Image (cartoon, rainbow, N blue to C red):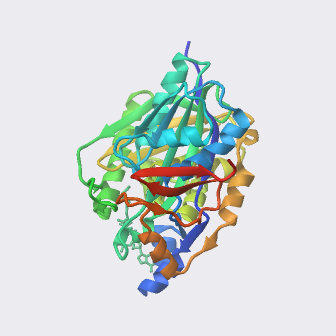
Amino acid sequence: MVISTGISAMSFFTPHRYISLDTLAQHHGIDPAKFSRGIGQEKIAMPGHDEDVVTLAAEAAKPIIDQHGADGIDTILFATETGIDQSKSAGIYVQRLLGLPSNLRNVELKQACYSATAALQMACAHVARKPDRKVLVIASDIARYDLDSSGEATQGASAVAMLVTADPTLLEIGTVSGLFTEDIMDFWRPNHRRTPLVDGKYSALRYLGALVESWRDYQANGGLPYDGFAQFCYHLPFSRMGEKAHLRLAKEAKAEADMQAALPGMIYNRQVGNSYTASMYLAILSTLENSDSDLAGKFLGLFSYGSGATGEFFDAKVVEGYQDHLFAPRHRKILEDRTAVSYDEYVALWQARNGEDGTDTPMPDEAKGRYRLASIDDNKRIYVDRTA
Ligand code: COA
């Protein structure tokens, strides 16, 4: 018997400040339409000195724990490209901040923007074997490119937390996947670098190649036909990439591309920017929370891509009554309550070093959420819960 497994709760968080891409365009003296249309982005989320992938992750996961409790969770899988330690999993700090019990396993996964999908698949396999258990999967990233580089407009930050269970209440994850991996250098970040090295045009090209190859593998493995999907969610380094992906996939499937089947998934990402591992999961939330039609019983086509490069095409069936399990009003409030920063404030935030060189530093109190990185003491990151 195949046990249905998937996602029963999904929650996201993004910092309370952003720079508008119009402000960036004005500073660089270029047409704002290059960003709003050519790249398809409006805002870049900017974390403060006392925010990082741990605080973003804890903020994202807290509503899920508040609603579902910790009962049955025996694993935390933390996916990130912007890890804060070469050894210790960022998820262990989150486990403590959320007050989760000690009898669970906790590990961090890496493969550029892709690793949350590996985490989700592993979580589904685990709960299929142990249906009374649950897994907390968290994707959390801060996408930073060099100032004045072509990648600058595609920065961003967010975390998405997911509760993976048997008999899920939001999304049933399909058992068929299309997979593709090739050894290329399109985007990478050697250990000594804070920002990635990227060949943006080549990366976009290989992204589309991986999409086609993953789709072919998905079809070869007995996946759904193209017209079996109500909506598609793509990894979105910038939303225009999703548009290009949608056109390319339709061409491969010899179908007519309907952009309305991909645009709901781009709404949140345009407001937040790239958030690497969290990006496709933010697109799923954006689809579920912004689609005009009732998606119950319908299928989502999902394409996850991580440079270097791994691609995976898979599917999810939207569960009847899914609307009752979303945090949509909370998510809209998070986005609405943000404030814009000037170009100079953006540069100051961009340059903020939160402990990367290990120097003892108290962090300025900037985060508006419950959790913050209070200081670096003796090379240790000290995270606090303001309410404790
Ligand atoms: N109005 C409308 N569109 C405009 C415009 C204007 N005034 N000016 C330029 N554009 C369009 C260009 O025609 C181009 O569209 P196209 O892609 O259809 O050709 C688009 O805007 C981008 O401009 P372009 O000058 O080609 O690119 P760029 O040098 O600014 O770089 C990226 C854009 C996306 C390649 C760059 O931001 C990047 O490398 N980002 C990182 C990507 C990444 O993270 N990849 C790895 C993970 S998948």
Q: Where in the figure is residue 20, as x and y percent of width and height?
A: 55, 75
- What residue occupies the far top of the structure in this picture? 1
Q: Is residue 99 above or below residue 284?
A: above
Q: Where in the figure is residue 258, as x and y percent of width and height?
A: 55, 54
Residue 34 in view: yes
Who's the residue at 63% across and 37% down the image? 99
Q: Which quarter shows the N terminus?
A: top right
Q: In terms of image quadrants, where is residue 194? A: bottom left
Who's the residue at 59% across and 66% down the image? 366
- What residue occupies the far bottom of the structure in this picture? 29
Q: In terms of image quadrants, where is residue 221? A: top left
Who's the residue at 43% across and 32% down the image? 177
Who's the residue at 24% across and 53% down the image? 185
Q: Where in the figure is residue 248, as x and y percent of width and height?
A: 41, 53
Q: Locate residue 381 relative to residue 11 in the image: left or right.
A: left
Nearest to the observer: residue 376 or residue 117: 376
Q: Locate residue 31 relative to residue 370 in the image: left or right.
A: left
